[in-house]
Image: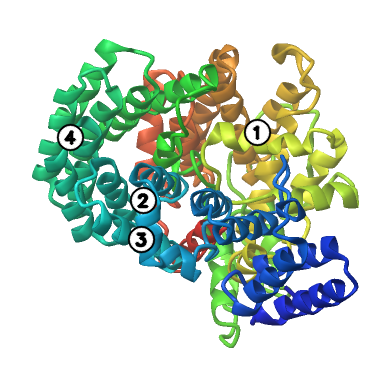
Amino acid sequence: MPEGTDDPTLPAEGELALARLALADGDLRHAAEHVAAALVLAPTLPEVHETLARVAAASGGDLDLFPIGHHAFVGAVVARAHLLAAAGRPAEGLDLLAAATGYAPGVDWAGVPWVTAPELAERLDPERIARILMQICAAAPDPVPRRAREPLRPYLTLARNAVTVHPEHALLLGAASALARRVGEVALAIKWASRGVRAEPSKLGEVWLGYAYRSAGRTRDALAALGRAVAHDPDDLAVYADLAGTLADNGRLDEALEWIDRALARDPTFDCAVHTAHRLRFQRDGDVAHLVALADFVRDHPDDSHEHADLAECCRSRPWLGQVTPAGGPMLDALRQALADEDTARVPVRLDAPEPPSAMRTVAAAVPGLDVEVTGTVEPDPREPRRATTCQLWRYDGATAAPTLPVPSPAAAERVRQLAHPAWPHPPAAYDAAVNLATLELTDLLGLLVHPPEPPTTALGRVLAGQDPSLWVRCVQVWACLGLLHHRTDEPWAESTRRRVLVELVWGVEDWITEAALFALVTAAWVDPSVRPDVARVVAERLADVAAVARARRVPIAASLAHLALATPALDEATTALAHELTATSPGGPTRPGVLRRLWRRLTALFRRA
């Protein structure tokens, strides 16, 4: 749509004008292309359908003007659907509209008179209608968000009409119930599913009824219906998983795990049961080993029966499992205060020791002229690497840090700007996404750590730049380190450049880069079981060092490193206990007061819209 245009009918009318010109010249192919484009812009506009009818009349109803090959244009698919309906083949037309809805569920492809006309239900076989409704449901979330329900209303009207004509058709009633449930018509969903079960008791009917009851909050009735579904077909282990999920959602975790154990006893590799089992066990005790085992299962079974979201659900909003942890400390407190109220006089910042160099430089760049004074030093000196390293990123002049590396190439800066993000579904997904940085040079990846580019001009970038630039810097550092995981992957891990560089960064100057590098190592352990003992050893040694230093002075990154330890596969019990202790006692833990909590609410809303 042209920039600044809110009314989609304006560009659609432009396409129609071109279609009419092509019609006048007898160029039916170009006329059809413009009509198909207009349908995408305004699928229910009467003028679009009038012009489509003119093209059909001029061509004698030639369907080949709207081809539907392997890479079909959705506008051509919808145009063909309407022509099929006009030619007396509405079932085929509905199939195509359903395919378009699956491709773009938010568009009102079916909001046209022939779909909602009562006589359509009289002409179609009820089983065909049921299959079409099931196809629509398969492409829609459960429930569909309120703002996205309107395009599905024509299909619900079709369901109403069909149920009126075929009031005892069990499959139709169940499929109609599933659609009604998704668009918030829960009472109607219960009514239809109940009628379907009475007409023809079946496993599928009881499942639809159980889901309808569950959506209405009638847990006891939902469990009873799902229990009857199991009685119909004891070998359908997906119903066991549904029962377990329903029980767990209502705080009955022990019973839920009993159902999952029954399913796994029948088939220990059944994907729905395995996913649910690991999710519920993690929910019970918080042990990341369950999620690592689930990630291993996903990697080893790429052909699961359908997509599951259990791993992402468990990792969502958890430190390092699903998102960058925001940094804390007096420098960032001053930054957030200055950004929140620019009219307030800036309060001088007095530090008893240097903060992490990334923090100091981020604040200096975001709030020029901020009065910062470092009044002393502490031991162990945070400006010194914790172990000898050849990967020195910072040099100090007193308390002021400066990068030792040159600015990365513009191409590298743009690559990470497009990729960097404060959240990811789970560590293996972050690893997979970072493959886009695999071709960057090592000097560029290291340069990004100390010379982060400006945020992108996206909604996310504007929020980060305006409310917390530190989070953007941390994003860049995290993704640059994930990019290091893809550097020279032909080298065996133990002697690899990627391992050597990341370990040296972990033991370098106490900084946000330490966290980013350790996260990359932890991610490597998630995706490659063979490196887990090595990574667990590095994490244990680094956390023990943090605990030792924390007995002498504050360690700003202590809580974050402890959360990283808790995300580490195969970590020993003593280090796990130490990590729990540090998350409980270190400042800047998972609780984000005030401005940070508001920032994450805004970012979460952006993630959901993305």
Report helix, strand or loop for mark 3. helix
Q: Say which residue label 4 marks.
A: 226
| Left or right relative to 124: residue 261 | left
Looking at the rendered structure, which numbered label has been put on residue 142?
Answer: 2
CB-based contact (under 8 Å), mark 4 and mark 2:
no
Report helix, strand or loop for mark 2. loop
Instruction: Determine the CA span between mark 1 and mark 4.
Output: 37 Å
Looking at the picture, which amino acid does disc 2 mark?
Asp
Foreground of the two, 143 or 509: 143
Q: Is residue 149 visible?
A: no
CB-based contact (under 8 Å), mark 3 and mark 4:
no
Instruction: Determine the CA span between mark 3 and mark 4.
Output: 25 Å
CB-based contact (under 8 Å), mark 1 and mark 2:
no
Looking at the picture, which amino acid does disc 4 mark?
Leu
Q: Earlier in the sequence, mark 3 or mark 1?
A: 3
Looking at the picture, which amino acid does disc 3 mark?
Leu
Q: Say which residue label 3 marks.
A: 156
Foreground of the two, 332 or 239: 239
Report helix, strand or loop for mark 4. helix
Looking at the picture, which amino acid does disc 1 mark?
Asp
Q: Earlier in the sequence, mark 1 or mark 4?
A: 4
Instruction: Determine the CA span between mark 4 and mark 2.
Output: 17 Å
Q: Quadrant of the N terminus?
A: bottom right
Q: Residue at x 48, y 38 (%)?
A: 321
Q: Earlier in the sequence, mark 3 or mark 4?
A: 3
Q: Is residue 544 visible?
A: yes
Looking at the rendered structure, which numbered label has been put on residue 432?
Answer: 1
Looking at the image, is mark 3 or mark 2 nearer the viewer?
3
Q: Quadrant of residue 209?
A: top left
